[in-house]
Image (spheres, grey):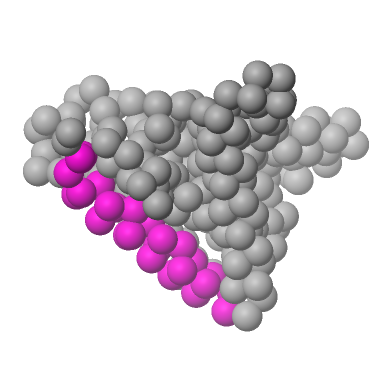
Amino acid sequence: MKHLVPPEQPSESMLVGCLLAASGGFQDAYTYNVRDQVFANAQTGNIVLLGVHLSEGDFKKALSYLVPILAFVAGVFVDEWIKHRLEGKLALHWRQTVLLIEILALVVVIFLPLGKTDAFANALVSFICAMQVQSFRKFHGMPYATTMCTGNLRSGTDHLVKYFQTKDPSRREKSFHYYSIILFFILGAAIGAVGTKLWGSTALVICCILLAIAFAMLFVKPKTE
């Protein structure tokens, strides 16, 4: 499978993308199943539900959706600060620093009691999801997202349509890559759903392992011709 680890930056490899997508799907399933049916990654859903509850006058419930939205915004700000202020000043690459923060935050979430701390837990997960999607924006030089699927679905289908029109094999390969990311997101969500039903918050250990593998993959030096 020579295409899984291309000669670009390690952060743009297919394997890292699939690991992060599985983690993204897992986290969404976790917050929805265990933390008051809030989406950690898909802020569009939270924005819609925020509007719905505001229209019903249920401001307390609306607040539970506003918190992860604001946390997501904060995550993008912090990620950009890490990238521009700490790049080259740390022993680790700034993307590895982001993954470490993500793992540590998930460990904190594991120990947060269910119920009373759900808002804080959802905020933490949304915060780190924003950092992940902001840090890992390309694979094989193509734009993509690891915490949501709409853009990937559009891009994958667009390349598939153009493959049928032109018979260009590169289009077919690009389409396959996008659909692979979506598949791993679904797989992560499925594992997250089953894991949280069996073990509750402890299931996030699986997510931490996925991120730890991605973290290790970033030490792999790019191939040279």
Left or right side of 154 for 52: right
154, above or below 124, in the image: above
- 214 and 168: which is toward the camera: 168
- When asked about the image quadrant of residue 208, the answer is bottom left
- When asked about the image quadrant of residue 11, the answer is top left
Question: What span is colored magenta in the figure?
Answer: 199-223
- 3 and 155: which is toward the camera: 3
Q: Residue 55: image x %, image y %? A: 88, 31
Q: Residue 155: image x %, image y %? A: 62, 27
Q: Residue at x 25, y 47 (%)?
A: 218
Q: Residue 113: image x %, image y %? A: 54, 69
Q: Residue 64: image x %, image y %? A: 67, 45
The residue most toward the right is: 56
125, above or below 85, in the image: below
Q: Residue at x 44, y 53 (%)?
A: 19
Please tell me whether the stretch drawn in magenta is mainly helix, strand or loop.
helix
Left or right side of 9 for 194: right
Q: Is residue 85 visible?
A: yes
Residue 204 part of the magenta segment: yes
Q: Residue at x 58, y 24 (%)?
A: 168
- When asked about the image quadrant of residue 33, the answer is bottom right
148, above or below 217, in the image: above
The residue most toward the front is: 167
Q: Is residue 35 visible?
A: no
Q: Quadrant of the C terminus?
A: top left
Residue 80 part of the magenta segment: no
Q: Residue at x 50, y 74 (%)?
A: 202
